[in-house]
Image (spheres, coloured by chain):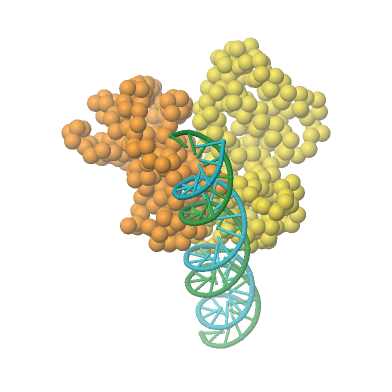
Chain colours: A yellow, B orange, C cyan, D green
Amino acid sequence: MLEGQYLDSLGAAAGAPRPTEVHQHLRGLIMSGAIPPGRRINIDDAARQLSVSPTPVREALAGLESEGLVVKVPLRGYRTTELLTRDELIELYELRMLLEPAAAASAARRREEGDLAAFDRELETLSGHPAALPAGALSAHDERLHGLVFDTAGNRLISRTYARTHCHLHIFRLSYAGSYGHGTLDEHVEIVRAIRDADPERAAETMREHLDRSLGRVLDTVAGGRAERTEPGRR
Amino acid sequence: MLEGQYLDSLGAAAGAPRPTEVHQHLRGLIMSGAIPPGRRINIDDAARQLSVSPTPVREALAGLESEGLVVKVPLRGYRTTELLTRDELIELYELRMLLEPAAAASAARRREEGDLAAFDRELETLSGHPAALPAGALSAHDERLHGLVFDTAGNRLISRTYARTHCHLHIFRLSYAGSYGHGTLDEHVEIVRAIRDADPERAAETMREHLDRSLGRVLDTVAGGRAERTEPGRR
DNA sequence: ATGGCCAGAATCCTATAGGAAAATCAAATA
DNA sequence: TATTTGATTTTCCTATAGGATTCTGGCCAT
């Protein structure tokens, strides 16, 4: 069964349920961890909780399947995607290692005043006490900052490619709270500094180091940390 | 009128009776050019032609929208995606320039006997007369060969990322028949040779040159060629 | 006691119907 | 003649119902 109380922000708008809202809402539930990885999604229950009929829910799930957030077993229903395996994490970081240093270098070449202000604002949101942050805040910050790098780099296709694959890492980090070390914020500061200094080579290099250390932290988590992330729960 | 069998690189296991067939069939119609870019898709008509009800058609379109092959305007229906603009083509080649040289280098390191045989088979399919080939054969060959490079490289995530974006270039090439020059096949041979020689650096370099020249050919087409690719047809 | 088998229940999947919004076309007026 | 307005038609969008399939629990045989 789905856990109740999914109606939080989008729930009871007046009368007309927009089709895209169902998609966005379900995506938010998955991305926030409200629906954990590997859990079955009952179409009828989801429709009731969203106050719509099963048809738009099915339509939204079909879209989420192409995004890789859910999988459909033809006559057995939909399930959220399983958590990334160790090998898949390594593959994901190989992709990041190709895209992000180049994006950082491009950002260092193209950055304008507005971009720098956006970076400053993002860094300030977490400056101070990284220990007292609520779970998921660091993951959200990380996603936003790397997104800013791509936005500044200016290639929208690459930016979308990044977003499409990065959501899986986001879910992984939410499941294993603790995939971040103290170095994360400092490394972000270094990357932003290189971009501000309009130094493409150093931006790429700091990004490479950041990714390398980040992969190390993630692999430590998946290897040394607890193997179970949620209750065994029926799949 | 249907029975798809358009092979999917991800290889969804057979036996899925109905739902995926509609998706695959529509994708085939778009990828083959049977439904030109920018054309409206009437859900009821498509359902009649496929001998199914509008519901699974709608579900398939929702999935295709997440793949970027169609766009949905909330109360106006679905349309196939417009042809890539010049800027989008450049962005696509920037992405390829990041992914494919690295993939070629990795393929040169990891290639085994079976991979080399697959490359040979692919090259032989077109060896001989590149002028007498039916329209689209070159485009299909190009897509298969670059796909082989990614398969040999061994990172499935990057391979899927490539496939997801490359389909747009495929459609572009079908619309502008003539985006290929005589050099294409020769350049492919050079790339395969470097992979066979287990020379990662040369594989990456030949791939870079190939992409550079390919972009030049494509831009020549979009700039000098005819500006209209189909009848104005209602959008 | 364990494995196979069967019936009930739950779930998914498709089809059809009705309501709403937008596009289209005809007609009337300035 | 050009423009605006109104009604018609097309199309999308959602809800509901029925058929097909799979899962679950209990029963029987070995």
Instruction: Give me the residue at 48% from left, 58% from top.
Output: B54
Instruction: Tell me if residue A43 can be seen.
Output: no
Residue B137, relative to residue B53: is it above or below? above
Could you say which is closer to the camera, residue B132 or residue C8? B132
Could you say which is closer to the camera, residue A21 or residue A158? A21
Q: Quadrant of the N terminus of chain A?
A: bottom right
Q: Quadrant of the C terminus of chain A?
A: bottom right
Residue B234 percent across, percent down from the top left: 41, 42
Instruction: Give me the residue at 41% from left, 47% from top.
Output: B27
Could you say which is closer to the camera, residue B204 or residue C24? C24
Total marks in image? 0
Q: Is residue A121 left or right of residue B8?
A: right
Q: Is residue D2 left or right of residue B171?
A: right
Residue D7 percent across, percent down from the top left: 54, 55
Residue B161, relative to residue B190: is it above or below? below
Instruction: Give me the residue at 53% from left, 34% from top.
Output: A161
Tell me where residue A123 sits by quadrant. top right
Instruction: Tell me if residue A58 can be seen.
Output: yes
Residue B221 percent across, percent down from the top left: 33, 25
Residue B67, relative to residue A203: is it above or below? below
Instruction: Give me the residue at 29% from left, 38% from top.
Output: B136
Residue C2, relative to residue B6: is it above or below? below
